[in-house]
Amino acid sequence: MLIVGGAGYIGSTCVFRLLSTTNMRVRVLDKLMYGGSSTFPFFALEDRFEFIAGDIRSVDLDKLLEGVDVVFNPAALVGEHICKKYPEDAQTINEDACLALAAACERNGIKRFIFASTCSNYGKTDDFVDETAPVAALSLYAHTKINVEKALMTKFPKLPCTVLRFATIYGLACRVRFDLLVHEFIRDAWNDKSVEIYGPEGWRPFLHVDDAARAVVMVCEQASTIPPKEVYNVGANDQNFQKETLGKLIQARLQCELKLNHKAVDKRSYKVNFGKIEKHLGFKAIHSPEVSIDQICTGLESGLITADQLEESVNVAKDDPIRKDTRTLDEINAAKPKSKL
């Protein structure tokens, strides 16, 4: 199996799950934007683990796929802020390179291509949505994911594809991030003794990173029997929370102040139904935000998680001006100068 971005947050957790619970051999390609220490333990399994340093935009894809039967691609600039800051890289990594990889997979007879997508694709909804609901990209990040999804479902007829729309990820792992919503709130509560919540009534679904990896493993194990083209939301119905409710969970643990900002509203809000993946694949989440919040707070209190790690594992710094840019993708595009041609 090949995992592109296998040193990242989701990628390295998948490598751990695959090596510890299956007999599969795993090849990782990673550009090492955030280092590669997450992969260090895997080298002990030298007969089943292989690492290649490289950029998916420039490697020889046919050579990369030699001896591979399943591909998982979580490699991307992940999140609204980093995609706004580096829009060209977001386009070339998240979309262009992924579709080039899919084309290579098709011509090399790959048995299953698994794509890491996002529930952020739903944009803003009032009711619970499932996979049949329309998608609406409010950010460049979601825009690239939606474009790839559509292409995988329509432009590669000979390539079996499974799209996994992950809920917002949380949880400690080999490589951790502290700019995803649960972790970001904890970081602010710990550093500043207060959490400012933009659009506190907004809804988000959540998913532990290990549960995300478990879903990938399930797809791998059932690759020969599941439909050739399918989209699954990945998460748990009881882990849909309003942002204010999430803040209160953290407040109860760290005794911080909550500042509810109703003026600078985050336009995304979505509640997601995850019944399809449970029915079709038997997937159920085994982790919860409440337990993970306590684990992370305990890690901070014990010194297991250091101040440096809090800052170094943030893709876009808290004081970066891009974080104050609340425009949607349509608003950004409307502001661009019109071509004179």
Image: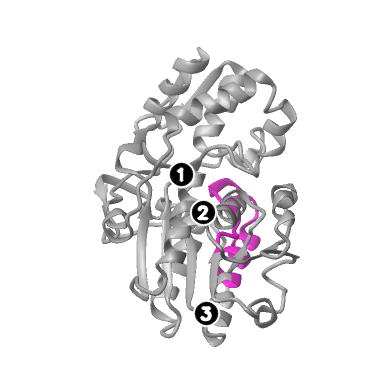
In the picture, the quarter occupied by the N terminus is: bottom right
Q: Is residue 53 left or right of residue 108?
A: right
Q: Can you give x and y, in whole percent of width and height, for residue 102 in the image?
A: 53, 76
Residue drawn at (47%, 22%), measured in percent from left and top? Answer: 250
Check disc 3 and give the amino acid type.
Ile
| Amino acid marked by disc 1 | Thr
Q: Earlier in the sequence, mark 1 or mark 2?
A: 1
Whether residue 326 is visible to the viewer of this picture, yes or no, is yes
Are the residues flagged by discs 1 and 2 in contact, CB closer than 8 Å?
Answer: no
Q: Left or right: 126 with respect to 55?
A: left
The mark found on residue 168 in the picture is 1
Per the image, the residue denoted by label 3 is 110
Q: Residue at x 67, y 54 (%)?
A: 7
Secondary structure character of the magenta stretch overall: helix
**Mark toward the start of the polypeptide (3 vs 2):** 3
Q: State the extent of the magenta-drawn residues as a range.
A: 73-97
| Residue bearing the label numbered 2 | 332
Is residue 146 one of those drawn in magenta? no
Q: Residue at x 46, y 52 (%)?
A: 214
